[in-house]
Amino acid sequence: MLKDRKLPKKSTRIWVASHVTALFAPSVSTLPSSSFTNWRDTLHVGSLGLGFSMDVGVITEVQEIRGSSSHQHQIWFDDVEVPFEKARLSIRALKLLESEIGKLPGMRVRHYFEVPIGGGFGTSAAGVLGLLITVRNKWQLPLDDLELFQMAHGIEILEKGGLGDVLALYHGGFEQRVKVGGPGVGTCRQFEEVEKKINVLIKHFSGLETKSVLADERKMAKLKEVGTKFLNSFTRLHHLDLDLLKKGLQEFDDVLSVMNSEVAAELQWLWEEGYVAGQIMIGNGVFVLLEASIKANDEKIRILKDRGYHLHQIVKETVRGV
């Protein structure tokens, strides 16, 4: 897990893993109000949850724009420059760094996405964390690894990009978030060796804006009730129980009811066929978990690939220089 080792200090091109939340229980009573303006205010805010980091993610690199001032930043998604309103988290990250350590030169930030934006893959967390690390490394800023993770968590909360992805990336692997908060405050338990035992298959349908769901207080309250009930039962286990997980996912997804008709139909088919499957939180996509050691699952993987699924691995190492 990252909390036990150092982030790359020299690389100015950083890869950060994607993260899928299978189910969660938002900390509704501590969601930030408009009066929260500092990332430090958010360290006790977040969610409980269950999820995993994957072998695809976001690559971020920065280049100085010679002769420009800080207000002349450029943000690129893949090969397209995007307006600032579509890159709120990246812009907030740059402003946060300037508020902490002083003016920075104008820079060109490029995010390369290996997973769809708005698909529930934690691209906002991966992008903003990658940006903070890259800028720290390029200009040798006096910020330690934990501070960067905490800043990324704060930006996610303040911009409603997500609640628990950064904490999950801090730990890596297949995790259960058991105490709400950002890195250094919130805590996770890990299911050891799961990345070697479980195959993940993903099918993406369309984007879903996380902010639109997190802003619905009534839905968040219901999700907290159902999610907390299931997560409490899971906490008592010493291993990943796929049968219990399958039951919890079906109940949770029924309550969430933000899926489109394609996702709903796909999940119904998967559940009828006996798969451990759920909606990606929060996105219009589906994940399936299969035990790698069962030979019969090879045929299931082939069937799912024919239906448009992509096979991925769970990873513990969530940040590296590339």
Image (cartoon, rainbow, N blue to C red):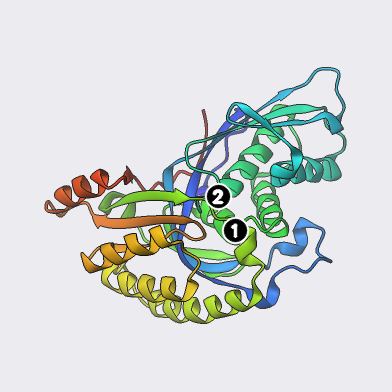
Query: In the structure shown, which secondary structural element does the residue marked by tag 2 occupy?
Result: loop
Q: For label 1, count other residues whose C-alpha is less than 10 Å away and answer few (under 14), some (14-19) or many (20+).
A: some
Q: Position of residue 163 (x, y in %)?
A: 60, 62
Q: Is residue 322 above or below residue 222?
A: above
Q: For label 2, count other residues whose C-alpha is less than 10 Å away and answer few (under 14), some (14-19) or many (20+).
A: some
User: Is label 2 in contact with label 1 (beta carbons under 8 Å)?
Assistant: yes
Q: Is residue 93 left or right of residue 27?
A: right
Task: Quote the CA–CA distance across marks 2 and 1.
Answer: 7 Å
The answer to whether residue 176 is visible is no
Q: Does label 2 or label 1 sit earlier along the sequence?
A: 2
The answer to whether residue 322 is visible is yes
- The residue that label 2 is drawn on is 118
What residue sits 62% from the left and 73% below the top? 27
Closer to the camera in the image, 87 or 295:
87
Closer to the camera in the image, 316 or 74:
74
Q: Which mark is residue 83?
A: none
- The residue that label 1 is drawn on is 210
- Three-letter residue code for mark 1: Thr
Q: Position of residue 263 (x, y in %)?
A: 40, 59
Which corner quadrant of the image does residue 250 belong to? bottom left
